[in-house]
Image: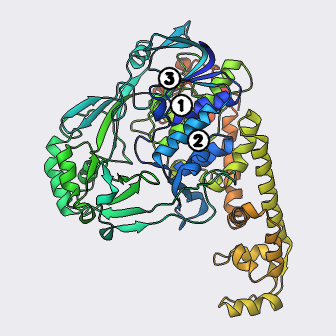
Amino acid sequence: MRLQYDVIVIGAGHAGCEAASAAARMGSTTLLITMDMNKIAQMSCNPAVGGIAKGQIVREIDALGGQMGIVTDRSSIQFRMLNRSKGPAMWSPRSQCDRALFIKNWRETLEQTPNLYLWQDNAIELVIEDGKVTGVKTQLGVTFGATSVVLTAGTFLNGLMHVGHVQMAGGRVAEPAAHGITEQLRDLGFATDRMKTGTPVRLDARTVDYNAAERQDGDTDFHHFSFLPEVKSSLKQRPCWIVYTNDKVHQILRDGLPDSPLYNGQIQSIGPRYCPSIETKLVTFPDRDSHQLFIEPEGETTTEMYLNGFSSSMPWQVQISALEQIPALRDTHFFRPGYAIEYDFFDPTQLRHTLETKRVANLFFAGQVNGTTGYEEAAGQGLVAGVNAHLKANGVGEEFVLRRDQAYIGVLIDDLVTKGVDEPYRMFTSRAEHRILLRQDDADRRLTPIGYHLGLATAERHNLMLSKWRQVENLIDFCREFTVKTSVINPIFEANGLPALRQGCKLYDLILRPTLTIVTLATMIAPLGAELDKLEPARRDEIIEAAEIEIKYHGYIERETLIADKLTRLENVKLRGRFNYADIHQLSTEARQKLERIDPATVGQAARIPGISPSDINILLLLCGR
């Protein structure tokens, strides 16, 4: 049996799976250590992938050649494109998944990946020699050697679960916590703290009164996560259901607050602001009469349902008594109550943009150990860490770093290593200043060439991307060149209740009108319909949508590209290793301290550090000769 690897990944959650898959597919002999091979990529909380900004991250992972989008599509029991009423920069894909099938599909993916090996055990110690990680020791007494190690332990590091006054050690319900690594790294000088997250009750679908709930079906159009057209779900699609809390629910919960671990001092750690527990909602929004809850299926055939929006750590009696006041749930059987979990994380400003730690060479962190929350944020970090672990282990290629104007993953990692976290970090579209450039529809054009260069994206995927965007450009060119004559279009417009044209114009200019679409115009203008018939049938709708977005938002895209190009100039001014900031007394005291601690790679990164003023940046530029 092999005991020496190029890369070892600790933890087979969403970060660990992407990290191990990436490193192995790039050519590194890779070992993935997990406590339970039957829980690979377990969806610890809600059985869904994507959502606001999170869906964009999954599209980026897929475009780079990662696996999350493919596994999600094959496991999907409902797909929706959120925010369709807003502009395309806000459109966010989300997929309800079969939880058990998601695990099965990920395990099959890993087992069929060349160079990738699995070992079921608990990692308890890192082997570190001369400031560099060289391996991992396990609970079974095995020592594995490696050139690079990626730590993706999720919520398992000293995990502690809470249900009312009951406390249970564990990283997830019915699964043990991991001990040893936090203590070892703290002794080496790593800053560590505790965070808290939670999960709701699980319901028996057979006991829900659906007549008292609102049905929510998924979309039936061409959208899905992976850019590979053949990757789609063959599963039966299932609806979600919407219910609401009420005054009776709120009163029971308020009466139970003295027994809530969040409010009786039992939990001291930092909880999520943007996915709060139901008790936090009541305290934060005391004037709200109700809160929306979603009953979500856990799979194609299972009767287990997830109550999204009712995360709680209150005693099980309080949770169930409160939920029984909701008409649709008055006779519901509950599989288990919700619980909160506290776990260790490490200050992410201790990392470089490659996610390698500054204190220990060749050691990478990814996922919730960096203070993030969410499967998608974890997977994006895992892919970046896995790629860089491979590059570092083999001494090949430049560091893999994505800029803020290239990907949401770039925004995520830059925020973490530059600003740190004071609560579990969750991605939002508002965090991306260049979000019009980071749309879900063009992630393949932005990132597949990068993935192909790295050796992650296949030649087939790269060629599909080139073919798609060639057809998009051809369609846009046709619209720019084709002239619409008033004698032809005005009778059609008038018949459809549309204002007539005063003079002929290019088809491109008609598409700019908010009320007109390419598909609508194709029914009126035969040459456009003929042009659409030339498109690749399997991707026809996708190509038309991409062309329309490029036309309607061309001005915004062009302007944002110019702004991004200007800001990128600061990213080209290197800082790391050039100065001893403590000796630059022209800088403010706060600037000297933060620059020394974070050690930014560029002036652009330095400018984003909280507390660094424009005058501090000007001094750095002068010292750099700019």
Q: Is residue 414 visible?
A: no
Residue that mark 3 sits on: 597
Residue corresponding to mark 1: 16
Q: Quadrant of the C terminus?
A: top right
Horizontal side of 623 relative to 179 (left or right) equals right
* Amino acid type, mark 2: Ile
Q: Position of residue 581 (x, y in %)?
A: 55, 21
Give the residue drawn at x 48%, y 36%: 610
User: Count of labels shown?
Assistant: 3
Q: Residues within 10 Å of mark 2 (few under 14, many from 20)?
A: many
- Quadrant including the N terminus: top right
Q: Nearer the viewer, residue 386 or 590?
A: 386
Query: Given the image, on which type of amino acid does mark 1 rest?
Result: Gly
Q: Closer to the observer: label 2 or label 3?
A: 2
From the image, tell me which residue sits under label 2. 409
Q: Earlier in the sequence, mark 2 or mark 3?
A: 2
State how far apart marks 2 and 3 are (Cα): 23 Å
Q: Quadrant of residue 215?
A: bottom left
